Every structure is written in C-alpha cells, then in structure tokens.
Amino acid sequence: AELYRMYIATSADGSTGRVQVGKDVPIGTEYAELPPETPTGSATFLVVYTKSALLEQTTPASLTIVDRISSVSDINFEDADLDADEFGGILAWSAPADYEYVTAYTSYMGTDTDLTERTHLGDVLAGTHTVVVPVETPKSVYNGFLIYTKSSLVEQTTPAIGDLND
C-alpha cells in the first residue's frame, strides 16, 4: 500500500453513497484532516482505504460520523439607553444544550432586513453569556442580533438570531 484515501459513505463498508473527502495521505501518516464544514449529506460514516498503484483495498476501516450542532437560545436584549432613537444595554443568551466543543461566542448587530450585513459587537469565551451593546447605538441602522458559537475548528455558519426589542 502507498496511501490512505478517505470517503464519507452511507454504509460502514463504504459500498453505498461513497464520496471522497480530503486529500490522499501517505502510508505511515497517523492522521488526516477532514475539513470543517464538510457537507455530509446523508452519509453517516467516514471510511478509510489503503491504496496501492494497482488497486484500492476492498474492506475499509470505518468510523461513525457524529455531527455536532450547538446554537444558543433565549436571546434577550434589554435597552438601557433612554433616547428614543438609540439603544444600548446587555445582550444575553442561554448556552447551547450541546456545549462540549463550544470555546467562544461571537456576536453581531445586523444592519439589513435579512441580517446578512453585520457589525461586530464582541467575542466572549464559553461560560460567558452576555455582551455589552454600546449606548447611543443608532436604532435606524440595526435590525437584530446574531450570535455564533465557535469551536477550536470553526465558527458556526448559521447563527442564532435575536430581535432588537426596545
């Protein structure tokens, strides 16, 4: 054998729904990187084959894929700015039910109706569930809050969204 080749698959033996992921790695390598946010579709297994110049192994080693989803909930903002056209105060949220791999939270204020344009509010470490929204923030610019969880690998791609309730 000359290298290892990884696939995601819908069966542990790699016979169905097999799609190659990552790059081939030389024999003797003790790990291979599966890029964060790799789309798995209906695949539930990671299968690894050895491959020579002539052929690929027929029976792979396999692992069950465990895809973690960790999103905050109960986003709450209480405006402490007394001006009618401005806001400011504490943005708070509840930790995800599955927080084992959460290392931090990143918060933003959304500036358009679908919240795709955003302004960074702050980053806090896991265990902290609040961030300060500066007083005198103009209401006319912002429409809501976005909170992303972060792991040691990647920031969540779909945030939890909170309303700007004044």
Image (cartoon, rainbow, N blue to C red):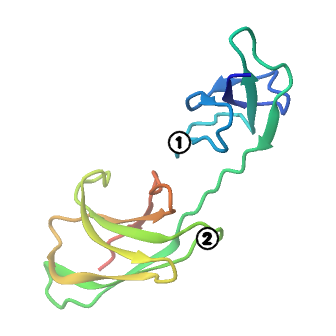
Q: Pick out the residue farthest to the top.
A: 54
Residue 9: horizontal and vertical position, in percent?
74, 30
Query: Could one spot residue 77 in this view of the protein?
Result: yes
As drawn, the label of residue 102 is none
Residue 138 in the image: state x and y as whole percent. Answer: 13, 73
Residue position marked by numbered label 1 in the rendering: 35
Query: Residue at coordinates 71% horizontally, 51% vertically from top-left?
Result: 66
> In the rendered structure, which amino acid carries the disc numbered 1?
Pro
SS label for mark 1? loop
Where is residue 8, by image quadrant?
top right
Give the label, 1 or 2, closer to the camera: 1
Q: Amino acid at mark 2?
A: Tyr
Task: Name the one closer to the observer, 127 or 109.
Answer: 127
**In which quadrant of the rendered view does residue 110 lie?**
bottom left
On the image, the x and y values in percent for residue 16 come to: 79, 22
User: Which residue, given by chain and number where applicable, does mark 2 sit on?
Assistant: 99
Q: Which residue is found at the position 75% from the left and 33% from the top?
A: 47
